[in-house]
Amino acid sequence: MTLADTSTTAPDLIARRAVGRSLEAPFYTSRDFFDLDIAAIFGAHWIFVATDAELPEPGDYRSVALGPHSVIIVRDDDANLRSFHNVCRHRGSRVLDQERGSVGNIVCGYHKWTYGLDGTLLHAPSQPPDFDPACFGLKPVHVRSVAGLVFVCLAEQPPTDFVDVAGRIEPYLLPHRLREAKVAAQVDLVEEGNWKLAMENNRECYHCDGHPELLRSFFPTYGYTEDNLPPRLRPAHERYLRVDAELRQTCEQLGLPYQLIEELDTRTTGFRIQRDPLDLAGESFTADGTAACRRLLGDFPTPRLGHLSLHLQPNAWFHFVSDHAITFSALPLAPDRTLLRATWLVHPEAVPGVDYDPDTLLKVWTATNEQDAELVARAQRGVSSPAYEPGPYAPTEYQVEAFCNWYITRLRAHLRR
C-alpha cells in the first residue's frame, strides 16, 4: 500500500494519530512513509552503527547502509574515528564495497581516486594542471563514540542534546570498559517487518512468554507495577524485590550507578537506562544465570551485577552484564524488511573454548531474536490486512507508546521545517 492508494495524506495521518493506540497501517506499509522515516528519523538523528571493538586498529573500517545512504566509519592514523559518505568525488562510484576491512588509504575501485584516512584526496590520475584536490575530499559525516558505542549523524546540524545524553549515560557504561573489549560474534538477521514494528516489539515484555530461554534469567515482571501485576507473576515479583535490594546494596558499595533515568519521548534524543537484577544466579543471560565468560568485562569483584539496559531512540538497545555486552540495532531496508544486527563483546583476552563457550554465550539472545523475528513478521502480515485498525496499548506497553509518541513528534518537527 502507498499513500496514493488512499485519500489521506501523510500529514493527515500524522496529525490524527490517536494517543495510546498503535499506528495506522500506512506507517508500517507505505513506501512514502518509509522514505519519510529515512529523511526525518535516520537522516536527522544520531544513529548507533557499530562499536569501537569493531575498529580496533588504524585503517579498520565499517560501512553501514542507512536507507539510500552508505556511510564509512574508519579509524585514522591517530586512532580517532572518522566517518564519510561512501561516494567517490569523481563520478559517484561506491568507494568501499565491503562491509568491513582494513586499508592503508581509501581507494575507489573504479578509477583509483585515493583518499587518506582523514578523507583528503591524495591522488586522482590524469587530472589537468589546475585541478585542486583540496576541493574533492570525501564528504564527512558526524561521528562520535560514547564509552565504546559508535554513532553517526547525517544531518548538517545534529541534535545538540546528544552531548547531554552521552554525559549522563557514560558513567553507567564506563565500568564495563567497552573500548577495550573484543567482538566475540556478530549476527545479522533480516526481519520481515517494518523497522517500527521491530522497535515496538523490543519496547515491551507483554509477549515475553514467547521467550522461554530469555525468561530463565530475565524477570517476566518487566513493565508491570503493583497495580497491574497478574497473580501468576506475584512469586517472581517477590523474588525480584528481594534480589533488587541486594543489587542496589552491591552497586552502592562498588560506586556503580543503577538508578532509572527515563526520558524516552520528552527530548530529541530519547533514552532509558537502568541496572536491574537477573534471576537465578543473577550473573548473565544463561540457562542458570551464571556467567557465560570466565573473564569479566570490567574490574568487578563479583559477577552478580544483574544487567544494565540502555534504550536509545530511534533504533538501538543494549544489555551489559558483568561478563559480556550485547548491542542491537534495527536498520530499515524496505517498508517490510529490517536488518537486526546483534553484537556480542567480551574481555579482550577471553579465548573461545577456554574462557567461554560460544554456543552458550550466544544461545539466549540468538533464540530470542529469532522468536522476535517471527513475531514481527506476523505483525507485518496483520497490519497489511484491510481489516487492521489501530488497537489500544496495555499499561505494560507504555514504552511502546513513548516510542510512537517520540516518532510522531519527530515527524511533525520535520514537516514544519
Image (cartoon, rainbow, N blue to C red):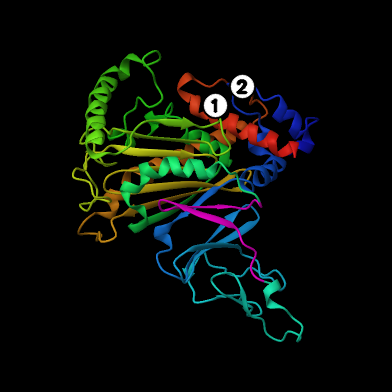
User: Where residue 56 sits: x, y (%)?
Assistant: 40, 64
Q: Percent x, y for residue 361?
A: 29, 49
- Which amino acid type is shown beneath numbered disc 2? Val
Q: Which residue is mark 2?
A: 19
Disc 2, SS:
loop
Relative to 266, 188 lies left or right: left
Q: Amino acid at mark 1?
A: Glu
Q: Is residue 211 above or below residue 61?
A: above
Quadrant for residue 301, please give it: top left
Crowdedness of circle 1 by 10 Å Cα count: few (<14), some, many (20+)? many
- Residue 297 lies, with reference to residue 414, above or below; the image says below
- Which portion, as a residue range, is magenta? 137-156
Q: Depth check: give the residue in front, 309 or 199.
A: 309
Under circle 1, the secondary element is helix
Left or right: 124, with 102 as reference point: right
Residues at circles 1 and 2 in contact by the CB criterion of under 8 Å: yes
Q: Can residue 155 be seen in this snapshot?
A: yes
